Amino acid sequence: MSSNNANQNTNAAAQAEAEAPAPSKRAWLGLAVLSAGLGMIVLDGTIVGVALPDIILDLKLNITDAQWVNSLYAMLLAALLLSTGRLSDRWGRKRLFLIGIVIFVGGSLYAAMSADAGHLIMARAVQAVGAALIMPSTLSSVNAMFRGKYRAAAFGVWGAVISGAAAVGPLAGGALTQWGSWEWIFLVNIPLGAIVFVAALFTVVESKGGKSRPGADVDGALLSGIGFAALVFAVIEGPEIGWWKPTAELHIFGLTWPTTAPISLVPIAIVVAIGTLTLFVIWERHRAKVRRSALLDLELFRLPTFSWGNTTAAMVAVGEFAILFVLPLYLINALGLDVMGAGLILAAMAIGAFVSGAMARHLAARFGSPGTVLIGLGLELLGIVVLAFTVTATTPGWVIAIPLVVYGLGLGLASAQLTGTVLRDVPVEVSGQGSATQSTVRQIGSALGTAFAGTALSVSLAFTLPAALSKAGLSGAEADTLAETTRQSAGSTITQLREQGAHSAFGPDTAKAIEALSQGFSDGSRLAMLIASVFLLLGFVGAIRLRISSNRPVPVLAEPDALVDDVQPDGPLPAVDIAGTAAAAAGAAEPTGAPMTDPRAGGGAGSGAGG
């Protein structure tokens, strides 16, 4: 009997999907504009990597500063996404999208005008605030504008934009830095942002998530923000100031943590991170219990596709951003390529991602979305492991590009299908929060990817650089100083030695020192890439669990924050089909404009008018 019911539900859901009306031309144009806005902020998360060696030399950054330039953007974005996802549902997704564009463009101008590490890092923080307003607004708008088979296609575009923009970033950064200066990687956002802003005014339809439970979860926002910040701080600063005992002074907000302190600030930050994130989960459960608005709907994690999909997405992000941090430093400093040459090699990922993004829909039709994600993770893992054992101080660039194409193929497959799979069973009235949670997980992964890669590289270089110099016959205090300077500068010292030639402090031994340092940096990069492959392996395991769980019945959730229609001041949205809706189970799709029933089979109290 249950088997017959399951078959009826499946057939009804398939019929409802097939009968979903085609989106209007304005909806498709809106998707293009939203994707362009999304692509701009994703591009900015990766475009910095290839320009980082030039920024390090120009602004005199050390490896810790370089990590913060990349990680702060992702970390702050992750900390804010849950809050802004909730705001987009309440205040209007189009409105927050437009505000986010303005703030992001302002942060880009600030970054381009930065003259030191402090101002650049602050500018990246401003960019992150703007990006946090843009990202959840794009996905929740897409989720509201499209339904049935058209939603799957729209999600595919959204996921392909993420993977494609992330992969194109290094090439764009190389071109802008080579033919202009590193400032142009930020200045280019100004005309792009202006075009997206004007286009969004005319093409994107305003939508809201409807009425929700009372109260603003300010405490939840503070706890999650402090927890994520403390975690990333510990990972980045550990190699520099000591994991347990202080090895260097830390200057922050005018205060100094001295080397004479009994314990480093790092273990304290780890304890703070564990404590605040644990309190965050407890607090969110309490908010749900007393029926107050919660920042994170923990009920969503009862959906296996949502929980395992987010786990997989986090691991994909860790692997991707670990590579995008380490590889440009290796290509420019160890191999001696210019920024454009490095960008061209890294563009191999973009080629793979675009090719597989176009193939993903066809593969998904045969193997299903979870199966396609599994294939993608397998290709990513293969590509990064081969890459790790390929890097040496003399490896030709085209050899490096081959495993990057394989990695890009996997990245495109996984990203394009993962988004729709994660949100497949999420009720549409909380799609803003669901999409914000997914985006938060991705950004946490990218922040940790940069942090783990930088830490692994820094720790590895502390061993590989002195060993390479010793093997080349260079030892003593001068060689030790050279190794430490190279580690601190993330390899930029090698580029400076190439420019100085025989006029450097090593005189005729300069070439020997460059060769040794390049090999030592290659060895350190290999270890950092292998660390990234461990996270991708965990993601592969998550993808296996995702595929298994996608074939199981969808759990019945408790009542979400909102049980009303997605509403649009610019005009009503038709009800959106979700697998397992009461309407689908009854075998009848609701007419356009009809109130939307509770999408959880047997759950909730029906619907209300959009507010």
Image (tube, grey):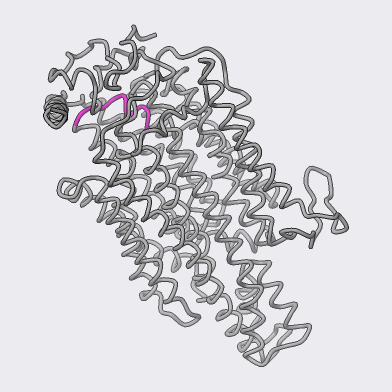
Q: Residue at x 62, y 90 (%)?
A: 471
When the figure is inspected, residue 373 is found, relative to residue 587, above or below; the finding is: below
What percent of the width, then of the height, locates residue 259? Answer: 85, 59
Q: Left or right of 36: which side holds 444?
A: right
Residue 146 painted magenta? yes
Q: Left or right of 411: which side holds 480?
A: right
What percent of the width, then of the height, locates residue 256? Answer: 84, 49
**Magenta range:** 139-148
Q: Residue at x 29, y 34 (%)?
A: 424
The picture quadrant where one finds residue 150 is top left
When the figure is inspected, residue 490 is found, relative to residue 166, above or below; the finding is: below
Q: Residue furthest top?
A: 609
Mark count: 0
The picture quadrant where one finds residue 508 is bottom right
- Of residues 541 and 142, the one nearer the viewer is 541
Residue 51 painted magenta? no
The C terminus is located in which quarter? top left
When the figure is inspected, residue 376 is found, relative to residue 437, above or below; the finding is: below
- Of residues 39 and 526, the one nearer the viewer is 526
What percent of the width, then of the height, locates residue 450? Answer: 54, 55
Q: Main secondary structure of the magenta part?
A: helix
Q: Residue furthest right?
A: 260
Q: Residue furthest front?
A: 1
- Of residues 323 and 496, the one nearer the viewer is 323
The N terminus is located in which quarter? top left
What percent of the width, then of the height, locates residue 600? Answer: 30, 22
Q: Residue at x 67, y 51 (%)?
A: 234
